[in-house]
């Protein structure tokens, strides 16, 4: 995040992924990231790159609604929408819409 934040022109989009362990990949079997550390990472990205889209990306399917809510409150302001991201599924569109309604988020 520090390298991106210190670029002369900060990126328009900063995707933040929660590792989804896929068998046969190099990181399969590693210690899972603490979810509050994940939320802190989003907050740091938001603070250091205030004009960038901080995208809550891969791994949302395995995140509890509460962690996704904290991620949005910490500064995530975008998601990747659709059925699948490379190797993992995304939450169902209706699930995303229900969460946005609970949080008072109005997608554009």
Image (cartoon, rainbow, N blue to C red):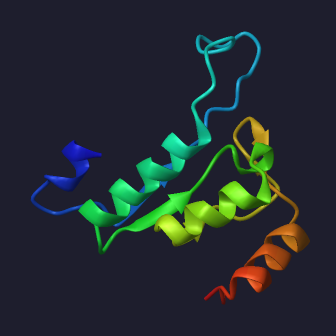
Q: Picture quarter containing residue 49?
A: bottom left
Say which residue appears at 34% left-offset and 55% top-offset.
44
Q: Above or below — where is 75 with respect to 88? A: below
Q: Above or below — where is 86 with respect to 65? A: above
Q: Give the total of numbered labels.
A: 0
Q: Position of residue 41 (x, y in %)?
A: 42, 48
Looking at the image, can residue 2 be seen?
Answer: yes
Q: Picture quarter containing residue 46?
A: bottom left
In the foreground, 24 or 68: 68
Q: Is residue 13 left or right of residue 64?
A: left
Say which residue appears at 74% left-offset and 48% top-offset.
63
Most distant residue in the left direction = 8
Q: Position of residue 38 (x, y in %)?
A: 52, 44
In the foreground, 13 or 32: 32
Q: Position of residue 29 (x, y in %)?
A: 69, 11
Q: Is residue 73 left or right of residue 75?
A: right
Say which residue appears at 62% left-offset and 33% top-offset.
19
Say which residue appears at 58% left-offset and 34% top-offset.
34
């Amino acid at each position: 995040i520090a390298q991106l934040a210190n670029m002369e022109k900060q990126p328009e989009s900063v995707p933040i992924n929660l590792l989804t362990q896929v068998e046969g990949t190099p990181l399969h079997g590693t210690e899972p990231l603490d979810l509050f550390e994940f939320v802190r990472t989003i907050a740091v990205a938001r603070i250091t790159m205030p004009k960038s889209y901080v995208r809550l990306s891969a791994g949302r399917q395995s995140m509890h609604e509460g962690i996704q809510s904290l991620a949005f409150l910490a500064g995530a302001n975008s998601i990747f929408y659709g059925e699948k991201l490379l190797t993992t599924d995304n939450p169902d569109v209706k699930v995303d819409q229900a969460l946005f309604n609970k949080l008072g988020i109005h997608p554009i």
